[in-house]
Amino acid sequence: MNIYRSGWILLCLCRALGAGAQGTDQNPSVRSDAAQAGRSAPASFSVVPLGVKGGLDESNLSSYMVAAAGSNEYICLDAGTLYAGIRKAVDSGVFMTSVSHVLKDSIKAYFISHPHLDHVAGLIMNSPEDNAKTIYGLSFCLDVLKEKYFTWESWANFGDEGEKPQLKKYHYSTLWPGEEIAVPNTHLYVQAFPLSHGTPYQSTAFLVRTGDALVQKNDAYLLYLGDTGADTIEHSDKLHRLWEEISPLVKAGKLKAVLIEVSFPNEQPEKLLFGHLTPALLQKELADLAKTAGGMSLSELPVVITHRKPSGDQEMMIQKELQADSNLRVKLIFPRQAVRLYF
């Protein structure tokens, strides 16, 4: 083992051991939001986008903190950007505490949809300063983290599996499709569903629930999709199967929001979609959801558009095409980094 690697291991060991002994700041206060005051009913979820773009801008990549409304105990859905997004949220008053406190203590766990860098770079880069916590994902995703990223050749092994020495800051927990798990130290429960992200590559949708313990009473749901292609393009039925799973929640009014990607405008050739959606493809998928839910209207369903790729004027083109589609009868939301959303 060379001198450089020995020094790096010693530094990481010290940080890993020290993280658990860190003192904590006061619990972060949640700033009241004007949009919340106008709601006719109490919100079920609080969402803080730490990053909303689909590449290019490394300071603003896919990452969403989600908590039960009124709680400071968050999970992070994907982690392309962490520090830069938290810093902006603290500076704007979304969190009334330090960046370090939010990273170490407010985020209780990570749920990673797939291991592309725009969804995990923040997790990897911030690992030396983070506290011990669990990384959840389907097996294909966790395998890449163990074998490609958290290794001593590429970074350092902060996990509790894989190459030795293992710093054991992060615990890997494999999710099984459709099986709901309770997230420790939060008021949230999560199910994972596989998605197709450019056959044969995979991604994941996470269905997040908040409610009364394990008894599904007065519960509410939020659906987050990692990168996904349309069933027609992917020659798959994974989105249709997901719509079948959530259609009873749509009928019951329990699905409070869907966060779904639209990466390219309609002009993007099908052969260059690489497992992503366009406005037209999203419209077809939502039409399938409405049909699966018994033909009911989705006009009251908030749909948050994630992962717009910022090359050229693509972001604006995507927004204009979505807003111009008269068949897309949903509540479109275009999230901004560090601007809290309530559902």
Image (cartoon, helix red, strand yellow):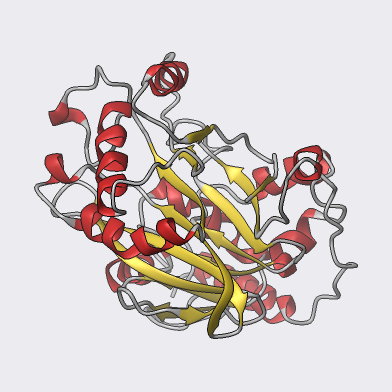
Above or below, comparing residue 27 to residue 47 in the picture:
below
Q: Quadrant of residue 72?
A: bottom right
- Please indicate whether residue 90 sits to the left or right of residue 9 in the image: right
Q: Residue furthest left?
A: 235
Q: Residue at x 22, y 38 (%)?
A: 274
Residue 35 in the image: state x and y as whole percent.
75, 39
Above or below, comparing residue 314 to residue 68 in the picture:
above
Quadrant of the image containing the N terminus: bottom left
Above or below, comparing residue 12 to residue 49 in the picture:
below
Looking at the picture, tell me which residue is in the foreground, 184 or 10.
Answer: 184
- Please indicate whether residue 20 sits to the left or right of residue 121 in the image: right
Residue 312 in the image: state x and y as whole percent.
42, 14
Looking at the picture, tell me which residue is in the foreground, 164 or 314.
Answer: 314
Q: Quadrant of residue 161?
A: bottom left
Above or below, comparing residue 53 to residue 327 in the picture:
below
Q: Residue at x 40, y 22 (%)?
A: 318
Q: State how many labels appear.
A: 0
Looking at the picture, tell me which residue is in the foreground, 234 or 211.
Answer: 211
Residue 334 in the image: state x and y as whole percent.
54, 32
Q: Residue at x 83, y 54 (%)?
A: 30
Residue 308 in the image: state x and y as whole percent.
43, 31
Q: Quadrant of residue 54?
A: top left
- Please indicate whether residue 100 sits to the left or right of residue 200 in the image: right
